[in-house]
Amino acid sequence: MGSVISATLLLAFCLLIPQTLLAADMEITPFSTINQQPTLKLYGFPLNSSATLTPAGKLDIALLQEITSDFSTAANPKEQLLFDGEAYRTTLAVTFGINDKLDAGINIPYLLYSGGFLDNFIIDWHDTFGMRQGGRDSAPKGAVNYSYRKNGVDKLKMANSGSGIGDISLTAGRKLYEDSDSNLSLRGTLKLPPGDSSELRGSGSTDLALSLCGATRGTTGWGRLGLFGSAGLLAMTDGRVIAEQQENFAIFGTLGAGWSPASWIAFKLQLNTNSPLYRQSSLRQLSNSAVMLTTGGTLLLPDNYKLDLGVAEDISVGTAPDVTFHFGLSRLF
């Protein structure tokens, strides 16, 4: 489903481009997003994988919104898993440029789970384009049920709507290299565990992520092109979500590209991946490496506000939600 929505979004962007504006100078930066699969998003994967730091003395304030519709089911003789629900994650991300080589910030998420309203829309969309339903059309509509059972024991069970503050992250960035065409930075994220793990708003673990982030760019007669990527290591203390099977280390990365045909718009696509966070399971939702693709772009609004719009889907089926809508509004002050 995500592929069709992404294509529709890109077509709509293209139709908005006046031919007189084909001169590009918008910076191409990654989407500030992570995999919203319910047992992954609770951990300390960094939202920000940009190699560009916040300028010295400036405050970068971003409001990020993820709307996720999840329906994923799997079973074998020992294990049964169901992720069914709609989740909203709103994050206030604030970063301050300490000097020309350092920045620091904080991310404060608010999570809401509900039955939502997207079930019928997604079922109709799948029918229209001949896509598989994966059992969504026969499941109860508007349900909230995140469960995992192994050997007759409930390892995860959350079946009620609710909302609250999630786990808070402290961030820092250090510029390593920069020239007119490329840059390289080291980023760190320390995630603290105030979120309620029984309500899937936190992992119960304290996590530290370190990542190397790079980008390169160039200008052509058709506009600006950009490539970006990151690779990192996530270390986690013992948490409280499927605790007996949780790994304490994971590797992760991003890879993306963008094209800015005009000074007010850029098109982007981005892959996010990570190694499994759980062991001793044969279900792909827990034991496979996750791969997610986000497609969309950035619009430059009046007063130098930037709006990111993206649609994310599971390239490796079951390791990310069927569809996540990403919105990010940011500005430098």
Image (cartoon, rainbow, N blue to C red):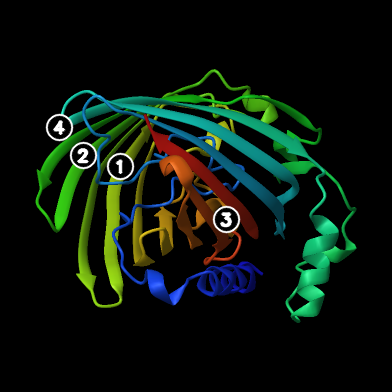
Left or right, residue 4 beside residue 249: right
Judge from the rendering whether residue 27 lies leftward or rightward of residue 199; answer left or right: left
What amino acid is labelled 1 in the image?
Answer: Leu
Give the image quarter of residue 88. top right
The residue under label 2 is 186
Q: Earlier in the sequence, mark 1 or mark 4?
A: 4
Q: Which residue is mark 3?
A: 320
For disc 4, the neighbor class at 10 Å (few under 14, some 14 to 19, many from 20) is some
Lateral position of residue 97 relative to residue 133, left or right: left
Residue at figure coordinates x 41%, y 43% from the top left = 304
Amino acid carrying mark 2 in the image: Leu
The residue at the point 53 percent across, 68 percent down is 13
* Looking at the image, residue 273 lies above or below residue 162: below
Cα distance between the residues tagged 2 and 3: 26 Å
**Could you give the CA–CA distance between mark 3 and mark 4, rounded to whole angstroms?**
34 Å
**Sooner in the amino-acid sequence: mark 3 or mark 1:** 1
Helix, strand, or loop for circle 3?
A: loop
Position in image of residue 217 (x %, y %): 21, 62
Point out the tag, 2 or 3, that comes first from the N-terminus. Answer: 2
| Badge nearest the viewer, 1 or 2 | 2
The residue wearing badge 4 is 101
Q: Mark 2 or mark 3: which is in front?
A: 2
| Residue 247 can be seen in this image | no
Quadrant (top left/top right/bottom left/bottom right) for the C terminus: top left
**Residue named by callout 1:** 233
Q: Nearer the viewer, residue 74 or 159?
A: 159
Mark closer to the chain start, 1 or 2: 2
Q: Which element is circle 4 on?
A: loop
**Amino acid tagged 3:** Ala
Asked if marks 3 and 1 touch (Cβ < 8 Å), the reply is no
Q: Nearer the viewer, mark 1 or mark 4?
A: 4
